[in-house]
């Protein structure tokens, strides 16, 4: 059984001065390499040295959109819909017009106690941070843009898995999923998520490891399986522990919304391709569970204190709220 924790977090907002400071110091990646991590070259052509397969990413937009049917893409609710640009395997760019959007809904499986003491009851329905966007016309097959398969699986299936993460400027890295939980954003949205810690300062991670910074919201994340990149969710939020300075990144987790998405796109005559990942082996499960015991204790020991901070205007640095409580 997976460890589920409840928290309120801040958004990965578009904070220009904060973003520029991060990019200038190359703090996003453990060891950033333009030749490895940039999907595109300076002239917008495909990077031949990119570490991922361009032909498997045609359904991933240049920014903030993941195509899941010829007519629908997914992004983060708090970033809103855009007219996305996708790139075919031959490097040809295609831009499409967004027409409408639907905020996917979260049905709470357990009571959620907010930092102010208010309890949201199990079974209640709330806006999530996943936005399903409908284009004004289907993407023509001749454009060479293929919708991404959607990951299906439970919370426990995700633990310890490596996840590919798209950052701003079409830079791609990866990280290991450490937790799965339901979170409340400072927009009021309640959403299912996967969480990964920035391990590089602690001597862990790898050269591709990244941590989210301002401006990364709405970009996609993926799990590689069976020779494909399975759409896992979108970048959502960040949290820095004020006592330990450990950084945690939060991504929307799409699997719990698969049935809802399927129903929505079916109304337009389309379907999504869902691929379930196998459960971890028993050995991995045991190691992951042991790791979670450590993680839970560490989280409890370093819980932040203070008042809940609401979303700030886009010219202010985000602040994490105070609640990071284990409800497993």
Image (cartoon, rainbow, N blue to C red):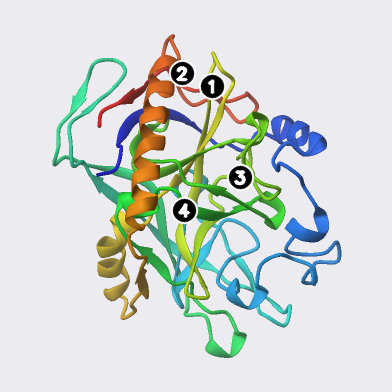
Mark 3 burial class by Cα count in 10 Å: few <14, some 14-19, many 20+: many
Q: Residue at x 55, y 72 (%)?
A: 59
Badge 2 local density, few (<14 within 10 Å), some, or many (20+)? some
Q: Which residue is mark 1?
A: 319
| Rendering coords of residue 186 (x, y %) | 42, 29
Rendering quarter of residue 47: bottom right
Q: Is residue 189 visible?
A: no
Comparing labels 4 and 3, the label whose residue is closer to the camera: 4
Residue behind mark 4: 161
Q: CA distance from mark 3 to mark 1?
A: 16 Å
- Sequence-wise, the earlier of marks 3 and 1 is 3
**With respect to residue 133, does 269 lie above or below?**
below
Q: Is residue 260 above or below residue 13?
A: below
Dot 4 or dot 3: first in sequence order is 4
State if disc 2 and disc 1 touch (CB < 8 Å).
Answer: yes
Mark 1 or 4 closer to N-term? 4
Q: Which residue is mark 2?
A: 309
For residue 216, the mark is 3
Give the CA separation, mark 2 to mark 3. Answer: 20 Å
């Amino acid at each position: 059984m997976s460890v589920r924790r409840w928290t309120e977090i801040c958004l990965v907002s578009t904070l220009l001065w904060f973003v520029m400071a991060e990019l200038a110091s190359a703090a996003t990646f453990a060891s950033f390499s333009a030749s490895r991590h940039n999907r595109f070259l300076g002239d917008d052509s495909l990077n031949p040295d990119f570490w991922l397969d361009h032909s498997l990413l045609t359904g991933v937009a240049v920014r903030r959109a993941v195509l899941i049917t010829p007519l629908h893409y997914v992004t983060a609710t708090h970033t809103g819909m855009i007219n996305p640009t996708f790139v075919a395997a031959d490097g040809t760019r295609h831009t499409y017009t967004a027409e409408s959007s639907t905020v996917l809904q979260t049905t709470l499986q357990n009571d959620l106690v907010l930092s102010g003491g208010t309890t949201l009851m199990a079974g209640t329905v709330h806006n999530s941070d996943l936005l399903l966007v409908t284009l004004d016309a289907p993407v023509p097959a001749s454009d060479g843009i293929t919708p991404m398969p959607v990951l299906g699986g439970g919370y426990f299936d995700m633990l310890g898995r490596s996840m590919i993460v798209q950052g701003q400027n079409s830079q791609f890295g990866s990280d290991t999923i450490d937790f799965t939980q339901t979170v409340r954003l400072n927009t009021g949205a309640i959403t299912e998520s996967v969480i990964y810690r920035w391990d590089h300062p602690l001597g862990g991670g790898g050269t591709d490891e990244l941590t989210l910074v301002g401006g990364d919201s709405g970009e996609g994340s993926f799990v590689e399986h069976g020779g494909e990149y399975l759409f896992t969710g979108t970048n959502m939020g960040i949290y820095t522990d004020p006592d330990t300075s450990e950084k945690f990144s939060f991504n929307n987790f799409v699997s719990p919304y698969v049935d809802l998405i399927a129903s929505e796109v079916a109304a337009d005559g389309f379907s999504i391709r869902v691929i379930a990942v196998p459960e971890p082996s028993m050995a991995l499960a045991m190691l992951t569970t042991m790791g979670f015991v450590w993680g839970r204790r560490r989280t409890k020991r370093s819980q932040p204190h203070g008042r809940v901070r609401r979303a700030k205007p886009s010219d202010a640095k985000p602040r994490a709220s105070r609640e990071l409580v284990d409800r497993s």
